[in-house]
Amino acid sequence: MTPATSVTRTPEFTSSLEQGLSNLAEYGYTVVPGVITGDSLKRTRDAIYRAAEDDRQRQRELPEFALDYGDPTTNQRIWNVLSRDPVFEDLVEHPMAMEYVRNILRWPALLGNLSANICGPGCAGGYLHADQTFLAEPWPEAGPQGLNCAWAIDDFTDDNGATRIVPGSHLLNRAVRPEEMATDTVALEAPAGSMIVFESRLWHQTGANTTTDKTRAGIFAWYTKTYVRTQENWFLSLKPEIQQFGSDTMLTLLGYKSQGFGLINGQSPR
Amino acid sequence: MNTTDLKQQLTEQGFCIFPEVLTGAQLERARAGLQRGIEITRQVMGSTHIPTLDPNASSVRVNNLPAMDPVFLELLLRPDALQAVEAVLGSHYLISNFTANIALPGAGPMNLHSDQALVIPSPWVHPWAINIIWCLDDITEANGATRYLPGSHRYQSADQVPEDAFQQTLPFEAPAGSFIAMEGRLWHTSGQNSTEDQQRRMMFAYYSADFIRPQMNWSMTLPAEVQASLDDQARQLFGLSPAGNTRIGAELTRLPQTP
């Protein structure tokens, strides 16, 4: 199917914030390579695979997820990742992620969710969608109301289930129509340790894993404007030590430091 | 009121008044509950004046009403109130806040605003919030009735608000025990209490579409015994259930699968 937009080029990887913001405006996304490396990448990778294994051993996986199709056991989703290991706190408030959040969403912003998926051999991929479909159209002209910072924990490749996107589709400023589900997409190929930043209007989907032996883990930090209700209800599910030890930035992202919404007796909870 | 008429009024006017739904002992219970709330607020918070909202201390504000007295839970969940809420928001909504504003003699007005415009970027095409305003006294222009700008619920952006907007506002007048259902896009402000001896007690039960974050953090602010008293419907309306902002995403499962 013909791409929905005229943007057929893709941006090069960049570590420059200025270039990254320009890529977000033009393409709806940008890839920052090598944000976590070496030991910290290894610790993060170990922690997410351990959480996945624990869920599987203890039969705590959700049976299915609305945005996936095919055999649900080939694409394992891990929820409430922030409560699983302290190493994930470092991703949520990574200075580079915060730069993009502050520039695109302004501050304060909220963390709506921190989830992961591990797409294994046979994973059929997911539905093409934009993340701000919670808003009925017309969408605001003011720009995106949310932002994903997706962390490639393994190399993201065309054949192992890399997230696929429609470059420039954010400029349509609307959701995917049912007849557009087969729109041409490109794989977001990125080496492990990259942070892929994409805004809430960009059309994307989980790719298919056509390998026989590779898994592809990604961790998705979803940030929003402060009026949007978080997907994860932190006040029910977050482990208490983060309330105790979390930085001001973390507590703001989780709604424990707040203005206008999420108040207690008219004031910020902390 | 039948649902068709209710929807028509809310669509055309942006508001609808349900006269005298609380009478006699019911009205007295609500007044007594509010008095308790005022006393608790003075003890706990030290003051009922919120300088960021009101010009002087003659505007008395009470937050967190559902924590103060069971009568407020009853009001929030009354079928007639929820009928008005659902006429505007459909079936997917949350309780966002429930506060009181008492205008004593000398109370001055807030700035003109629509509740939706304060937090949601334009265009404001759909109503995503509604106030159910409980009137505990006869509400008159003289004692500080909420003032609304007729037709302003159709404004899609701030540049449609006329320069003399305040001069065009009209008071919501209603007898004690009434509630006024006012959708989130209608521009309004509190009035001025120019009487010498009347208080004007109003309580604002605010509901919003379920993707919008509630103003109050009910998980942390409702006392444990109040949370324990809630049935499943009430828990869901306060956002205390595990369900999050995933309803619309889940509906994508109905879309056809890519070949």
Image (tube, rainbow, N blue to C red):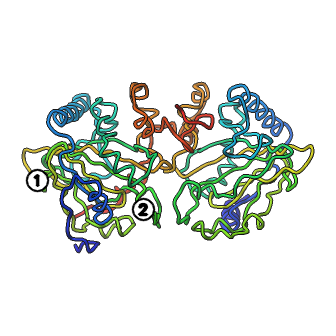
A56 relative to B123 in the view: left or right: left
Say what secondary structure mark 1 lies in.
loop
Who's the residue at 86% across and 49% down the image?
Answer: B138
Name the N-terminal-most of marks 1 and 2: 2
Who's the residue at 86% across and 43% down the image?
Answer: B199
Q: Amino acid at mark 1?
A: Thr
Query: Vertically, is A265 above or below A13?
Result: above
Q: Amino acid at mark 2?
A: Gly
> Can residue A74 be seen here?
no
Q: Position of residue B55 (x, y in %)?
A: 74, 47
Who's the residue at 71% across and 58% down the image?
Answer: B188
Along the viewing direction, whichever of A87 and B108 lies nearer the viewer: B108
Q: Position of residue B152 (x, y in %)?
A: 67, 66
Chain label for disc 1: A
Closer to the eye: label 1 or 2: 2
Who's the residue at 68% across and 26% down the image?
Answer: B44
Marks 1 and 2 sit apart, C-alpha to C-alpha, by 35 Å
Q: Which residue is the site of mark 1?
A: A210
Query: Vertically, is B105 above or below B150?
Result: above
> Can residue B106 be seen here?
yes
Along the viewing direction, whichever of B84 and A6 lies nearer the viewer: A6
Say which quarter of the image contains residue B154.
bottom right
Query: Vertically, is A36 above or below B41?
Result: below
B233 relative to B7 in the view: left or right: left
Say what secondary structure mark 2 lies in.
loop
Q: Which residue is the site of mark 2?
A: A143
Say which quarter of the image contains residue B166.
bottom right
Q: Position of residue A96 (x, y in %)?
A: 29, 46
Q: Position of residue A190 (x, y in %)?
A: 16, 52
